[in-house]
Image (cartoon, coloured by chain):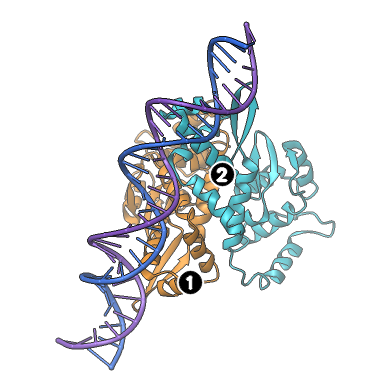
Chain colours: A orange, B cyan, C blue, D purple
Amino acid sequence: MQLDKQMLFFKALGDPTRMKILHLLSSGPLHGQAVAERLGLTSPTISHHLSKLRESGAIIARREKNTIYFTLNDKAIRQNVSGLLTMLEKKKEEKQSMEEKEKIIKNFFDQEGRLKTIPAQRKKKLYVLAFLASQLEIGKKYTEKEINLIIQRYHEDFATIRREFINHQFMFRNEGIYELNPPEMWLGINE
Amino acid sequence: MQLDKQMLFFKALGDPTRMKILHLLSSGPLHGQAVAERLGLTSPTISHHLSKLRESGAIIARREKNTIYFTLNDKAIRQNVSGLLTMLEKKKEEKQSMEEKEKIIKNFFDQEGRLKTIPAQRKKKLYVLAFLASQLEIGKKYTEKEINLIIQRYHEDFATIRREFINHQFMFRNEGIYELNPPEMWLGINE
DNA sequence: AAGGTAATTCGATATAAATCTAATTAGATA
DNA sequence: TATCTAATTAGATTTATATCGAATTACCTT
């Protein structure tokens, strides 16, 4: 279950040392040693924490010469917290819209199962995106090329659709790797 | 220290069992036994987790007969996450964009203070939305009709603007009731 | 007051995590 | 190549925490 991913993000923040690190990084990028000095801890310890933060997506590493600078990953942080809020939103109605949804899907795909056009209307677009996203595997990591190939099975304009996946939180991207968000995070599902 | 409180909140969320509990509670209040059954854990274990969640502020307990019902504490959750975003915000630029922002606002509103058109460009649109959102009252709960009426003072297409408020996290909606998000959550402010 | 049900506390155990020192690896440069 | 520096890994220790069964408490109902 990919609820795990969210959990790991919050677990990463749930430690005093790591919280201090994030706070330090909010003033700008720092490398491991600098963090270690400022917090009065050894560099293996900091290395340990930084790698947890990196795994969780909260920070990004960038190599320069042989020093590695760490930066807050604002986008991922915002994505995680807003994902939490979405997830906790009460999910009622849900069924009322099922038939409507199926009808829309049916209208926008042709007999070969290809997407005729990308819907302009927000709600319709979200339904179509949800359908396409559900063709991907939960928990699997995709390169951009792999994503493009899969999308191309349904529509030529893979770049737009790939971007929409990110915009509407069907997927997230980290260091060039794409992964499906849990359906609770998909926008448009409970609106 | 305030940072500690935040940390404890995230630590509370950083556990798979507790995350599942929150997820369960998102469909409505439950008592301890019910949670225990659904998760296949004993009631002492659940009691332990519930008390951590309660200490962190994520949930609220309400006694009824001799059963205690637990409910998500939406307000506190939102407060914590937006507090995180605030804390992590870089305190730079901030002023540099002020004039630009004012110029955009000025261009899109006419002499009567009505919005001429909804900007198509993302950044401009976000500035305009931020201005409109700032006409609403913090903490006040609005029905959809009330929101529509207020927006109509500025532009005829209230439906689009109301939707944009949600899309860009200026507001959130819960059971048909709209409320302003804290400005730290508004998208486009630091982009 | 007696009995019942839900919640909590206690004590024990096992797993996970933070931190250190020492050793190793990875890159850059002289 | 030799060497410097930064980062990571390994191994060990200590502390924290998730979980259970058993005992206890809290409150309700009869």
Between marks 1 and 2, how big is the CA–CA gap? Answer: 28 Å
Does residue A188 appear anywhere in the picture? no
Residue occupying the point 41% across, 51% down: A157
For disc 1, the neighbor class at 10 Å (few under 14, some 14 to 19, many from 20) is some
**Label 1 chain ID:** A
Observer-nearest of A184 and B54: B54
Q: Position of residue A51 (x, y in %)?
A: 38, 61
Q: Position of residue A180 (x, y in %)?
A: 40, 46
Q: Circle 2 — which element?
A: helix
Q: Amino acid at mark 1?
A: Pro
The numbered mark at residue A53 is: none
Question: Residue D8, image x and y in percent?
Answer: 30, 65
Give the label on residue A29, or none: 1
Answer with mark 1 or mark 2, whichever residue precedes in sequence.
1
Left or right relative to A150: residue A69: right
Circle 1/circle 2 CB separation < 8 Å: no
Tell whether B71 sits left or right of B37. right
Classify the position of the N terminus of chain B by image quarter: bottom right
Q: Is residue A72 visible?
A: yes
